[in-house]
């Protein structure tokens, strides 16, 4: 317990990886049906908060999860940003030789809205399974003693590493999809830090943006595998360009210190800063 309290962030990452990846060898052996648990970060965060912060920490996480009074413009940005990147990806993918996109793989508007709503409340899916951990626990903890830029770089490494098995589970390894997936994961880590810090540490806004970001699959408008692979690569490049733009044009936010509302409570024992 003493070691856990001294190194809560490291312990959280270890737990998140262990919980999410525990089924991989069993799945490979054919004795377990679920290869990867997206809910790992959520479970790890709840365990760590209970051990290091107690009820006060759990209340704080709950407060961040329902922190909705942040200004309507941030909801527009949270949903519009991933949709705009997806739209630009479609345009560029066609310009680079992909076939004409089809709405058949996207679904009707009612289907899209239903998928978005379910993703907001399903703890076994990415948004609710990840955001309370990455943004609800790790981000404010790291920002207590680090700038938002350094914090996000650290998170990007661990979150991308956590996602690596998912790039191999469906359809095997494909270089374009792998590179696009890595770039996209790094990029959205910057998007979500930017949203989180601009909204007083609202996990809700990152949950909304995460749900919007995956509601329409990147390759859904195409059926040809080559077009899909190219779309993933284009998406990753566009997403990382947007992330760079957020850093360049809002540099003051990134150089720190982070807003007090986007860090942890004083009772929390933050990870010692490494110089």
Image (cartoon, rainbow, N blue to C red):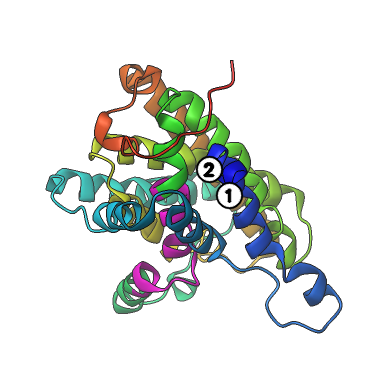
Picture disc at residue 17: none
Q: Is residue 114 above or below residue 75?
A: below
Specify few, some or many for label 2: CA neighbours under 10 Å numbering under 14, 14-19, or 20 or more.
Answer: some
Foreground pick, 25 / 192: 25
Q: Residue at x 40, y 29 (%)?
A: 144
User: Could you tell me which quadrant the C terminus lies in?
Assistant: top right
Label 2 – label 1 distance at C-alpha: 6 Å
Q: Is residue 266 above or below residue 11?
A: above
**Residue 173 drawn at (x, y percent):** 78, 57
Image side of residue 114 versus residue 224, left or right: left
* SS at mark 2 in the image: helix
Q: Are marks 2 and 1 in contact (CB under 8 Å)?
A: yes
Q: Residue at x 46, y 75 (%)?
A: 104
Residue denoted by label 1: 1
Count how many numbered circles sit on residues in the image.
2
Q: Is residue 133 magenta?
A: yes
Q: Is residue 189 above or below residue 153?
A: below
Give the residue furthest to the front: 2
| Magenta extent | 118-136
Foreground pick, 65 / 210: 65
Residue denoted by label 2: 5
State the image quarter where residue 116 is shown. Answer: bottom left
């Amino acid at each position: 317990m003493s070691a856990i309290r001294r190194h809560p962030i490291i312990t959280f990452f270890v737990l998140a990886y262990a919980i999410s990846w525990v089924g991989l060898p069993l799945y490979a052996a054919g004795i377990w049906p679920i290869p990867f648990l997206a809910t790992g970060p959520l479970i790890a965060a709840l365990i760590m908060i209970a051990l290091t912060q107690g009820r006060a920490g759990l209340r704080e996480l709950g407060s961040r999860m329902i922190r909705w009074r942040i200004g309507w413009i941030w909801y527009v940005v949270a949903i519009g940003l991933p949709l705009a990147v997806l739209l630009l990806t479609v345009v560029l993918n066609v310009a680079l030789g992909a076939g004409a996109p089809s709405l058949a793989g996207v679904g009707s508007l009612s289907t899209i809205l239903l998928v978005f709503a379910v993703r907001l409340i399903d703890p076994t899916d990415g948004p609710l399974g990840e955001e309370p951990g990455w943004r609800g626990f790790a981000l404010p903890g790291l920002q207590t003693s680090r700038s938002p830029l350094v914090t996000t770089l650290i998170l990007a490494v661990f979150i991308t590493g956590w996602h690596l098995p998912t790039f191999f589970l469906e359809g095997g390894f494909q270089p374009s999809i792998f590179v696009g997936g890595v770039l996209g994961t790094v990029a959205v880590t910057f998007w979500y830090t930017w949203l989180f810090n601009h909204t007083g540490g609202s996990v809700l806004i990152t949950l909304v943006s995460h749900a919007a970001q995956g509601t329409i699959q990147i390759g859904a408008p195409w059926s040809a595998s080559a077009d899909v692979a190219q779309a993933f690569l284009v998406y990753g490049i566009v997403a990382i360009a947007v992330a760079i733009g957020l850093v360049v044009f809002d540099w003051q936010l990134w150089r720190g210190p982070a807003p007090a509302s986007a860090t942890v409570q004083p009772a929390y024992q933050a990870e010692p800063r490494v110089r």
